């Protein structure tokens, strides 16, 4: 990786940090605090949210017919999702210790905090629960696969790919053959370092 690319990656990281700060400042304006896994709104906000909640009856009659028709397909996806969850979790539990890769924590990706929103009825909260699980699971699995790719094949593709995982941008360029195996060991050493840091944190 040349100095220009390294500098650009440093700028991207700095901008991402600024974005996180800006998002946090915006969230503070919405008047809620995060205490561990619990989210607490100010009393006035909770009361305003409760007034905006749609009754279950009104919600049921307002649903578009196509949503009822596709619901069995959407919720039928829970079966392959649960199987994927079991298999990918088993994979990292058994293989990551052997590779000296830090395990991906599910709770960093699968988050159920929409239940604290008083403006959602219980049907809407159930939908949010399902979406939180599905999207969180895919992000969790993606990070497991990303760490695996860093261990075995940290090489970019010749073609541009959309929304590559966070580790991808640090990978070796396509066709960068000089001392590939040396660089491969460096990537593996970095994974081992991450594991050591996670164990002391």
Image (tube, helix red, strand yellow):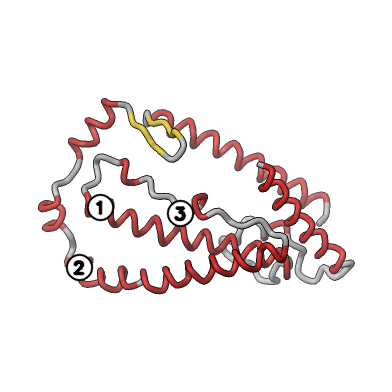
Going 21% across and 69% down the picture, which residue do you hit? 66
Helix, strand or loop status at disc 1 = helix
Which of the two labelled residues, at mark 1 and mark 3, occupies the earlier sequence position? 3
Give the quadrant of residue 192: bottom right
> Which residue in the structure is indicated by mark 2?
68
Pinpoint residue 86: horizontal percent, then vertical percent: 48, 69
Pinpoint residue 122: horizontal percent, then vertical percent: 22, 50
> Which residue in the structure is indicated by mark 1?
124
Could you give the CA–CA distance between mark 1 and mark 2, rounded to whole angstroms?
14 Å
Dot 3: within a 10 Å radius of its alpha carbon, few (fewer than 14), some, or many (20 or more) residues? Answer: some
Front position among marks 1 and 3: 3
Helix, strand or loop status at disc 2 = helix
Dot 2: within a 10 Å radius of its alpha carbon, few (fewer than 14), some, or many (20 or more) residues? Answer: few
Give the quadrant of residue 40: top left
Circles 1 and 2 in contact, beta carbons < 8 Å: no
Helix, strand or loop status at disc 3 = loop
In the rendered view, tell whether residue 166 sits above or below residue 41. below
In the rendered view, tell whether residue 166 sits above or below residue 32. below
Front position among marks 1 and 2: 1
Could you give the CA–CA distance between mark 2 and mark 3, rounded to whole angstroms?
26 Å
Q: Is residue 171 left or right of residue 108?
A: right
Dot 1: within a 10 Å radius of its alpha carbon, few (fewer than 14), some, or many (20 or more) residues? Answer: some
Q: Nearer the viewer, residue 82 or 143?
A: 82
Q: Is residue 161 left or right of residue 129?
A: right
Residue 33: assigned label: none
Pinpoint residue 27: horizontal percent, then vertical percent: 43, 34
Residue 110: assigned label: 3
Could you give the CA–CA distance between mark 1 and mark 3, rounded to whole angstroms?
18 Å
Q: Is residue 10 left or right of residue 68?
A: right
């Amino acid at each position: 990786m040349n100095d220009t690319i390294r500098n650009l990656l440093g700028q991207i990281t700095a901008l991402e940090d600024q974005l996180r700060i800006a998002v946090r400042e915006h969230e503070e304006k919405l008047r809620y605090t995060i205490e561990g896994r619990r989210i607490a709104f100010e009393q006035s906000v909770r009361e305003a949210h409760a007034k905006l909640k749609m009754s279950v009856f009104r919600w049921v009659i307002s649903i578009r017919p196509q949503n009822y028709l596709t619901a069995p397909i959407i919720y039928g996806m829970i079966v392959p999702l649960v199987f994927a969850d079991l298999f990918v979790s088993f994979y990292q539990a058994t293989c990551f210790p052997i590779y000296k890769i830090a395990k991906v924590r599910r709770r960093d990706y699968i988050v159920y905090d929409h239940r604290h929103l008083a403006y959602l009825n219980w049907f809407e909260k159930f939908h949010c629960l399902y979406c939180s699980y599905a999207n969180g699971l895919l992000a969790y699995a993606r990070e497991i696969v990303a760490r695996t790719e860093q261990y075995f094949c940290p090489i970019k593709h010749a073609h541009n790919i959309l929304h590559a995982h966070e580790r991808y941008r640090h990978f070796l360029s396509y066709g960068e053959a000089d001392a590939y195996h040396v660089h491969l060991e460096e990537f593996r050493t970095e994974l081992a370092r991450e594991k050591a840091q996670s164990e002391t944190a």
